[in-house]
Amino acid sequence: MTDRVTIDIQDHVALVTMNRHDKMNALDPDQIDAIIAAGQEVSATKGVRAVVLTGGPKAFCAGLDMASMANIAQDAQGDGLMPRTHGIANKFQATAMVWAECPVPVIAAINGHTLGGGFQIALGPDIRIAAPDARFSVMELKWGIVPDMGGLHLARRLMRGDILRRLTYTAETFGAEQALHWGVVTEITDDPLARAMELATAIAGKSPDAIRAAKRLISETEQTSPADTLLAESRIQQELIGTANQMEAVMAGLQKRAPNFTD
């Protein structure tokens, strides 16, 4: 890890902070690598039960660092974007997908500019908490390109197709209230980081097995048929019932005490 992205883990919650504040967390190759590395690290760290992803006071992430456009364009020449280097994704897509694929819930705490690639990264987490001043845009068409960091796949989980088309075609900027109305953000609050940490702490108090299973179940069934969804519910529930952490959750509830889970 570099100082481009910092990780602080306390009480089973990982706080991941994009730390290129002088550039509003704009995405150059090093920043992209650091974000992916942070996502991979917290995903693999034993004991992490929830993640909060945030940026700075003026920007969650302002999108592509235009000074890096030439380097990124060179990477895209020929089949440069086609190899699947990170599971089903290429490197650029992994910047957002690493949060969707994280095995535990991820909450984005959003202030200020969340534009282009930054907007797509914000779509990866499970929950988005935005400040009233947050500003969003699917900005790629302004530069003659299309969203290519997993945003179209991730956005379909949240918003209607006509809204997604409008925002993509126009590259317009919209505020937090409109984002809430369209389903892009979960809630608006004056202190997104404090609220995100509050939610993450509540999640981290649940059985780590159930937390991971719930995220896997929701992710697997977002676009599956009713039959496949019901089958997935049964399969994942069968894996949980009778395990040590599941029994501890029951006993703690019956005995009215804090549970003592094992990771």
Image: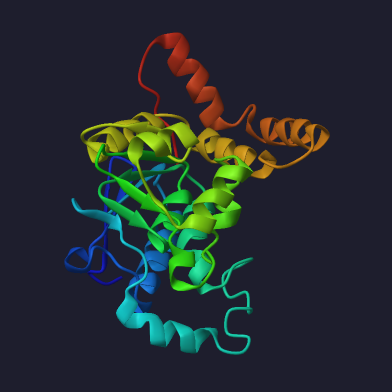
Q: Is residue 204 visible?
A: no
Residue 237 appears left or right of 41: right
In the picture, measured across the screen, residue 19 lies left or right of residue 257, that is: left
When asked about the image quadrant of residue 42, the answer is: bottom left
Q: Position of residue 41 (x, y in %)?
A: 40, 61
Please give the name of the residue rendered at 49% of the width and 24% of the height, measured from the top-left corner.
248
Q: Relative to residue 64, is residue 215 depicted above or below? A: above
Q: Of 113 and 210, which appears nearest the observer?
A: 113
Q: In the rendered image, which quarter contains the C terminus? A: top left
In screen coordinates, is 34 left or right of 6?
Answer: right
Judge by depth and name the residue closer to the eye, 161 or 220.
161
* Residue 77 at x, y percent in the picture: 56, 89
The quarter of the rendered structure image containing the N terminus is bottom left
The answer to whether 78 appears left or right of 185 in the picture is right
Residue that lies at the very extreme toward the right in this rendered image: 227
Q: Is residue 181 visible?
A: yes
Task: Please name whichever residue, 218 or 70, is drawn nearer the observer in this view of the structure.
Answer: 70
Q: How did the renderer colour the structure?
A: rainbow
Quadrant in which residue 161 is drawn: top right
**Which residue, as the protein is rendered here, is positioned at the far front?**
170
Q: Position of residue 10 (x, y in %)?
A: 26, 44
**Number of disc labels:** 0
**Does 109 sit above or below residue 143?**
above
Residue 183 coordinates in the image, percent (x, y): 49, 36
**Residue at point 63% right, 78% down?**
82
